[in-house]
Image (spheres, rainbow, N blue to C red):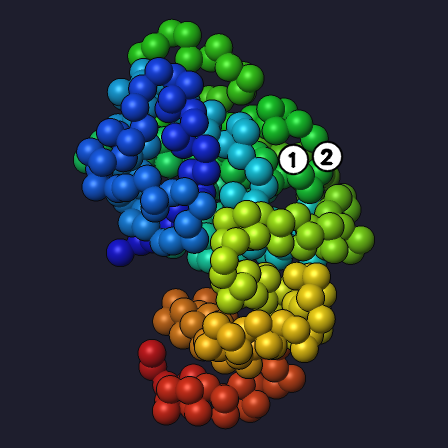
């Protein structure tokens, strides 16, 4: 089963209500309840989420529903992905980092870059399907991609040429939105950027990391006001690939003294060491299952000095060697 974070459709209920329809009834018709989307950090079925968006677009007679949903979403609707991107020096590198970490937000969707003349197509591929199609999940994902690229380039989210491999809507007035450059009936799903743009410095690089962390933490506190453990997991997960995921840095990101963070976690029946072990094991098992990188690269991405240290830790956790067939 492919899964996606529920907060990727932040603002769903508000948009449906603004269009004059009942969001709760629509959610219930697809087997969801509002609590799953009210700030909850939950994985839900990616296919069911796609069905919900297709049903909603039909009911509301809004063929660009998925795209419009992203129009007023905060960048934090992408979870920790912007924090990964903030560690990249160029626009192209930032897109690569997001591509490698996309599974943290959704499984069954992939991003890749294809040079075409003086341009580069940033393509999105989807492994999911539904009887109603997946046009809206494509539009939602492309809207997220536009928001992200706008953030790291300083350009408007409406400046990008959006191509989608789906039939054009029958409504003739679908272009009456801020997104004027949406092209249906294309052979790919993605946006087209100047290759030269990809070599430019990432607007969020270096000095922006701290502000990105701050914004992400504020979002986490709003989403999980009573769960310090979840806040720590999210921040630690995002910082892990940077090579510095120390207790001190995570505590500082949450505006807590390291000792106070430890005490508060102890009150919740868990420790920072335990959280980090669980994060590393989950990531390691996922990468090994997908064979997405070598054991050496995986060790470095998880913050270990070399593969032997990681292999020893992995065997302690699972009783298996990471080099075994997984």
Which residue reaches farthest front?
267
Read off the residue under disc 2: 154
Relative to 29, say whether 222 is above or below: below
Q: Is residue 130 left or right of residue 278?
A: left
The residues tagged by marks 1 and 2 sit, at their Cα atoms, a distance apart of 5 Å
Picture coordinates of residue 202, whole percent (x, y): 73, 47
Circle 1 sits in a helix, a strand or a loop, which is it? helix
Q: Which residue occupies 54% across, 39% down?
A: 145
Q: Which residue occupies 38% across, 22% down?
A: 17
Read off the residue under disc 1: 150
Q: Which residue occupies 30% across, 24% down?
A: 22
Image-quadrant location for residue 256: bottom right
Q: Nearer the viewer, residue 141 or 250?
A: 250
Picture coordinates of residue 14, whole percent (x, y): 43, 27
Which quarter of the image is occupied by the C terminus?
Answer: bottom left
Which residue reaches farthest top?
172
Which quarter of the image is occupied by the N terminus?
Answer: bottom left
Q: Which residue occupies 31% across, 53% down?
A: 2
Picture coordinates of residue 316, whole percent (x, y): 44, 91
Q: Nearer the viewer, residue 120 or 159?
A: 159
- Mark 2: give few (<14), some (14-19) or many (20+) Cα within 10 Å: few
Q: Nearer the viewer, residue 234 or 108?
A: 234
Relative to 110, say whether 193 is above or below: above
- Mark 1: give few (<14), some (14-19) or many (20+) Cα within 10 Å: some
CB-based contact (under 8 Å), mark 1 and mark 2: yes
Residue 259 visible somewhere in the drawing: yes
Residue 98 visible somewhere in the drawing: no
Q: How many marks?
A: 2
Circle 2 sits in a helix, a strand or a loop, which is it? loop
């Amino acid at each position: 089963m492919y899964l996606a974070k529920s907060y990727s459709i932040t603002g769903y209920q508000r948009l449906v209500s603004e269009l004059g329809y009942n969001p709760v009834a629509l959610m219930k018709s697809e087997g969801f309840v509002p609590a799953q989307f009210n700030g909850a950090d939950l994985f839900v079925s990616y296919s069911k989420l796609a069905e919900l968006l297709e049903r909603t677009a039909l009911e509301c007679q809004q063929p660009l529903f998925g795209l419009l949903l992203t129009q007023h979403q905060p960048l934090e609707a992408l979870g920790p992905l912007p924090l990964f991107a903030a560690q990249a020096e160029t626009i192209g590198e930032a897109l690569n980092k997001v591509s490698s970490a996309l599974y943290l937000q959704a499984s069954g969707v992939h991003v890749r870059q294809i040079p075409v003349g003086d341009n580069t197509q940033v393509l999105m591929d989807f492994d999911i399907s539904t009887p109603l199609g997946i046009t809206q999940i494509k539009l939602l994902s492309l809207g997220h991609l536009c928001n992200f690229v706008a953030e790291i380039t300083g350009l408007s989210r409406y400046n990008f040429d959006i191509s989608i491999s789906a039939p054009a809507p029958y409504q003739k007035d679908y272009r009456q939105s801020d997104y004027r450059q949406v092209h249906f009936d294309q052979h790919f799903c993605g946006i087209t950027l100047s290759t030269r743009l990809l070599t430019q410095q990432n607007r969020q690089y270096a000095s922006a990391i701290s502000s990105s962390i701050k914004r992400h933490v504020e979002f986490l506190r709003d989403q999980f006001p009573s769960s310090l453990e979840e806040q720590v997991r999210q921040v630690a997960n995002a910082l892990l690939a940077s090579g510095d995921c120390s207790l001190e840095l995570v505590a500082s990101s949450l505006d807590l003294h390291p000792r106070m963070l430890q005490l508060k976690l102890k009150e919740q029946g868990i420790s920072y060491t335990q959280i980090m072990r669980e994060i590393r094991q989950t990531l390691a098992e996922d990468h090994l299952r997908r064979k997405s990188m070598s054991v050496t690269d995986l060790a470095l991405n998880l913050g270990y000095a070399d593969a032997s240290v990681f292999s020893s830790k992995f065997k302690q956790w699972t009783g298996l060697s990471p080099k075994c067939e997984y």
